[in-house]
Amino acid sequence: MNKKELIKEIKRLKKEKKAIILAHNYQEPSVFEVADYLGDSFELAKIAQKTDAKIIIFAGVKFMAESAKLLNPQKKVLIPDINAICPMAGMVNKKELNKLKKKYPEATIVCYINTTTETKAMCDACVTSANAVKICKKLPQKEIIFLPDQHLASYIQAQLPEKTIIPFQGFCEVHAQASEQYFKKAKAKYSQAPLLLHPETPKNFWQYADAILGTGGMINFVKKSSEKTFLIGTEKDMAERLKLSFPDKNFIPLLGECVNMKKINLENIYQSLLEEKYEIQISEDIFEKAKRPLEKMIKLAK
Ligand code: 13P
Ligand code: SF4
């Protein structure tokens, strides 16, 4: 099938099977053409929790689909490529966490949504980049063990000096590979353009940023700004996502590609809908434990 036929078939199958497609902002523009909702990881989790569709197809990475399943256990949640994983989610090791727990017995444990279900089951609260500061501020404990992203942990610490954020050593390879030289060049070339930076980017890049935001926050920033050109300090296709909402503005990507996000495409979305694969399964013994921090996030983010 060519692209046009694939899109037509996907739309027909969605209707027939009462399915919705949730697409993360880093997906390729062709995926946006069949998506019912586009969003950041927090926005998509909230939509997943509320939908009455029978099937949720997650165009994103596995932890996002798992979060959708945890928040809406009655639904069938499918991911078109089971190998679309976030490497950072796999950077938590239980031994290291136990060491930190022993060293900081008063600390609460907060995880980024970019974690496996097994990790979530060991945590008290979950956050995304859209609500991390707000939620950590609301938690009564002064000490917070934060996993796995060390850079988001530094960002939270800088915003909340009254807290002690104890970081894990995880990182996102897309954001950690940012080039300072490239940032400097872009800043010099587009001197008027605000630079929007994702908090997964290391601390030494903060000095170039006009705002540090998750992907949903970037969309809101552009909406409110009268500027015409923006430098986008996150995964490269975020520039395409912004162009879709703001066709009259220009977006210059500063970072590389998340290869895992790009494993989802129209062909595997079609196969996923047709054969109802790959279904997210979560073992019963951790389901309730892993669901709690996500529900707490949604409650505290209000
Ligand atoms: P957002 O929640 O800001 O969309 O970020 C998700 C992510 O994986 C960033 O790399
Ligand atoms: Fe994970 Fe980084 Fe890809 Fe986001 S961009 S899904 S944090 S690897």
Image (cartoon, rainbow, N blue to C red):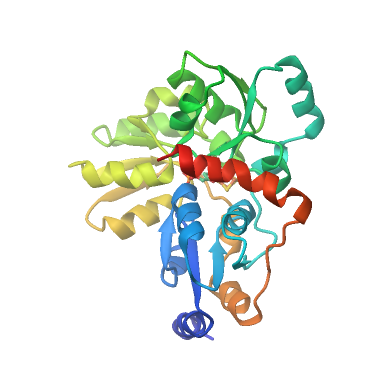
Percent position (x, y) of residue 122?
A: 71, 37
Choose top left, top right, bottom left or bottom right for residue 130: top left
Q: Nearer the viewer, residue 237 or 103?
A: 103
Q: Is residue 287 above or below residue 16?
A: above
Q: Is residue 66 above or below residue 165?
A: below
Q: Nearer the viewer, residue 104 or 292?
A: 292
The residue sitting at the right extreme is 95
Residue 181 visible (yes or no)? no
| Viewport quadrant of the N terminus | bottom right
Percent position (x, y) of residue 34?
A: 44, 72
Percent position (x, y) of residue 281?
A: 72, 62
* Number of marks in picture: 0
Q: Is residue 133 left or right of residue 117?
A: left
Q: Nearer the viewer, residue 63 or 29?
A: 63
Q: Is residue 238 left or right of residue 82?
A: left
At x 68%, y 63%, the residue is 280
Choose top left, top right, bottom left or bottom right for residue 134: top left
Percent position (x, y) of residue 193?
A: 27, 37
Residue 189 visible (yes or no)? yes
